[in-house]
Amino acid sequence: MTSAKLLVVDDDPAIRTLIHRYLSQQNYQVESAENGKTALELFDKISPDLVVLDVNLPDTTGFQLCKEMQSNTDVFVLMLTSLADEASKLQGFEEGADDYITKPFGLVELGARVRAILKRQRLVSNPEPENLSLGDLSINPLGREVTVNGELIPLTALEFDLLYCLARKPGRAWKRSELIQEVWDCEYVGDERVVDVHIGQIRKKLENDNDNLPKIKTVRGVGYKLDALLSNN
């Protein structure tokens, strides 16, 4: 099996080298960049499966770079930063980040986060995943496309995985911890409120007056479910 390709982007040479060496020892194919310009050049060249991305870069921000990288791809992004405030974390998730780790961090924890994200890639790549159709909402897992009445809805990789998880069992109420285990993998050790952020983003993108479009509903004291009333099952 071909090892995953990773791109490490950090302007601190010591941190960049440390991460590069550690992940290479975990049998990943690793490239690294010190700024946004080099990162985008390597990104186009190697098409990485996952990017470990620092927020503070000399020529751009990790938030902007994350948005650019995910504009035409389903690449996974693990944000890496010294910013610990809640607003910065929310901004990272809103730009499409799949996970967030704050400096200082342990390499073992970093490795666990990377494995968890890449495991999701294997799960959604299982042979012959089922196409889903709920009212006017259609989900194609092989093409990783979501459409409403034939119009493509741009979702990040994580948003797609969350929506597909909910749509596979419409009407089921999912706890946040269950969604994290299903989508992020049980190794995830971050804040469960990350689920709320991504659900909010999906809702914004699916906002529509169409009565034949299923809605993600909040189940008080539990988590979330996709409206089952329009299921074809």
Image (cartoon, grey):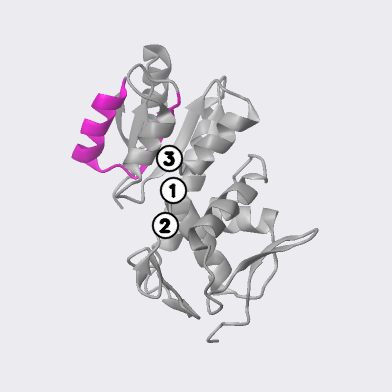
Q: Nearer the viewer, mark 2 or mark 3?
A: 3
Q: Is residue 26 magenta?
A: no
Residue 45 lies in the magenta stretch? yes
Determine whether label 2 and label 3 are within 8 Å by CB.
Answer: no
Quadrant in the picture for residue 221: bottom right
Secondary structure under tag 3 reads: strand
Residues under labels 2 and 3: Cα distance? 16 Å
Q: Nearer the viewer, residue 8 or 167?
A: 167
User: What mark, if any, has residue 122 been given in the picture?
Assistant: 2
Q: Amino acid at mark 1?
A: Leu
User: Percent x, y for residue 19?
Assistant: 42, 24
Residue ID for mark 3 = 77
Q: Nearer the viewer, mark 3 or mark 1?
A: 3
Q: Residues within 10 Å of mark 1 (few under 14, many from 20)?
A: some
- Segment tinted magenta in the rendering: 35-55
Mark toward the start of the polypeptide (2 vs 3): 3
Residue carrying label 1: 118
| Observer able to see residue 198 | yes
Q: In which quadrant of the rendered image does the C terminus lie?
A: bottom right
- 76 shown above or below 124: above
17 relative position to 203: left or right: left
